[in-house]
Amino acid sequence: MIQGSIVALVTPMDEHGAVDKVSLKKLVEFHLEQGTDALVAVGTTGESATLDEEEHCDAIKTIVEYAGGRLPVIAGTGANSTSEAITLTRRAKAAGADACLIVTPYYNKPTQEGLYQHHKAISDAVDLPQILYNVPGRTACDMLPITVGRLSHIPNIVGIKEATGDLSRYRKIRQLTGADFAIYSGDDATSCEFCLLGGNGSITVTGNVAPKLVHDMIKAAISGDRETAFALDAKLTGLHQYLFIQSNPIPVKWAVSELGLIGKGIRLPLTWLTPDCYNAVRDAMHQAQVI
């Protein structure tokens, strides 16, 4: 089971929006040095919605190659078309990804039965560990705990990223799944409490900017060290808030560029962080002592 601080990696781009592989390598090395436990390649934070299939799969392959087996790579392979999600998952397996993260189909609003059949079809088609991803604030589709419980009985569906921010969801999902089923927080602001409840880690945006601090906080929370976890999380509260002052990944890409790790590239329809937000994000970075 992959546990700990799992960073939803930004995809660095040049000023024209092309993927910057030099900076991508720099990011992988940075996270290895900082103690990040695993990386998510081309998830929401990695701008999966605006990369075409070849760019998407090439970025996953590149991150796997750069990681070189030194930390697990989870590939974002979700889509609102089941056939497309199967294709992306097959290609992620071929690229050497350790697992995949599959978001609930967005926009078309499937029923709970539709969600079950969608994920079952992907699991039947590709023998790769699969992590469900529930983020109704973005997808307009909420995978209910009862559906998660049903899907957890499929052997290669191994966990869920639960991003509602509702801590009661952890208890409901755990009651319906086995001990070997991983439950990850997908909400940075509540990830400390989530892991203290028994969660297996956090798939984190904040970890792009303060990876060591997030790693240490999640480690303390998983071990049940409440005092240490809360003390470390207190330094991260500004980042948890202001990395979402505009749509993710706009603020986090600005913050990572401030660290000198990537250039100022983002892909339309997203635009670069507006100057009126600079001080809030920069102050949060100071609070976390990363600048």
Image (cartoon, grey):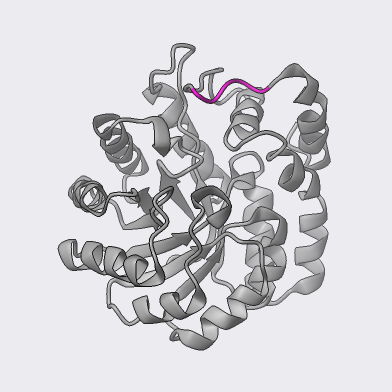
Which of the 4 image quadrants contains residue 118?
bottom left
Name the residue located 63 percent from the left edge and 72 percent from the top edge. Answer: 222
- Highlighted magenta segment, given as a residue range: 269-273
Quarter of the picture holding the N terminus: bottom left
Question: Considering depth in this image, is 105 or 187 the residue closer to the camera?
Answer: 105
Name the residue located 66 percent from the left edge and 54 percent from the top edge. Answer: 188
Which of the 4 image quadrants contains residue 120?
bottom left
Q: Is residue 286 left or right of residue 40?
A: right
Q: Is residue 270 magenta?
A: yes
Question: Considering depth in this image, is 139 or 222 the residue closer to the camera?
Answer: 139
Question: Considering depth in this image, is 143 or 131 the residue closer to the camera?
Answer: 143
* Location of residue 170 in the rendering, given as x and y in whole percent from the top left corner: 59, 75
* Location of residue 106 in the rendering, given as x and y in whole percent from the top left corner: 42, 50
Quarter of the picture holding the C terminus: top right
Total numbered labels: 0
Against 184, is 71 above or below?
A: above
Q: Is residue 126 left or right of residue 8?
A: left
Main SS of the magenta part reads loop
Q: Is residue 132 magenta?
A: no
Against 188, is 62 above or below?
A: above
Residue 153 seen from this side: yes
* Location of residue 73 in the rendering, given as x and y in whole percent from the top left corner: 37, 51
